[in-house]
Image (spheres, rainbow, N blue to C red):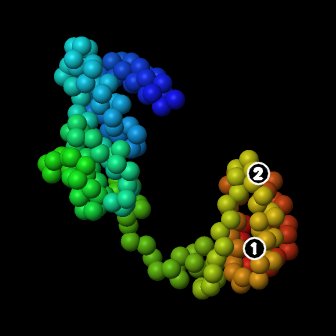
Amino acid sequence: NNRMQAAVNAKKLGAGFQALYPDLVVSLHPVMQHVPLRVLQLLQQRGALRPAPAFATVVTDLSDACHHLWFHDGVDRCFVPIQEVKEKALRRGLRSEQVTVHGLPVRPAFAQERPPKVELRKKLGLAASGKIALLVGGGEGMGPLIPTLHAVKDSGVRCQIVVICGKNVELQRRISKMEWGPELIV
């Protein structure tokens, strides 16, 4: 039941807010606007949390088709990735001064310019051109990686196959023993 879950979450949030007494609460999920804001409001009314912490939402959806629960007019600030999402926030009742178009919060390394694709392929030991099939296996050996590998090879699609085994040394050993030629990189 959604109401029962909301009540459980509200109780836990209230205890957390009172224990931590935050200066700022930042929400990164659309369902974490309404309940936390209501809990903060109730704590303020009871005098259990003064002054009230600022509340900010960071919307991570890149489309104006994002869920309406991202938007609550009680937030102090709503950071959105693109102008279209800001327009949706305004349609959902937020004021312009509450909404800031800020892009997505990513580490600087992800925003750096990358070398040309040919250089990256060479650095990774990949063919200079052509299709690449990337297969990623579970660290615990979960999932049908080897049958999937055979299915890709047997599909007739000409491609280089890159298999990531993570920390699964046994899977890496088994696949490395397969004689597939240069089109397989483990």
The relative height of residue 90 versus residue 127 in the rendered view (above or below) is above
Give the percent coordinates (x, y) of residue 79: 27, 50
The relative height of residue 1 versus residue 26 in the rendered view (above or below) is above
Circle 1 is placed at which residue position? 152
Give the percent coordinates (x, y) of residue 86: 24, 56
Please give the label number shown on residue 128: none
Name the amino acid, label 1: Val
Which image quarter: residue 131? bottom right
Name the amino acid, label 2: Gly
The local crowd at label 1, few if under 14, some if 14 to 19, many if 20 or more residues have their Cα within 10 Å, is some
Circle 2 is placed at which residue position? 141
| Residue with the most extreme left position | 97
Left or right: 148 as drawn, with respect to 59: right
C-alpha separation, residue under disc 2 versus residue under disc 1: 19 Å
Which image quarter: residue 83? bottom left
Q: Nearer the viewer, residue 174 or 27?
A: 27
Q: Can residue 27 be seen by looking at this rendering?
A: yes
Residue at (48, 24) in percent of width and height: 4
Callout 2 secondary element: loop
Residue at (70, 50) in percent of width and height: 139
Residue at (33, 37) in percent of width and height: 33
Callout 1 secondary element: helix
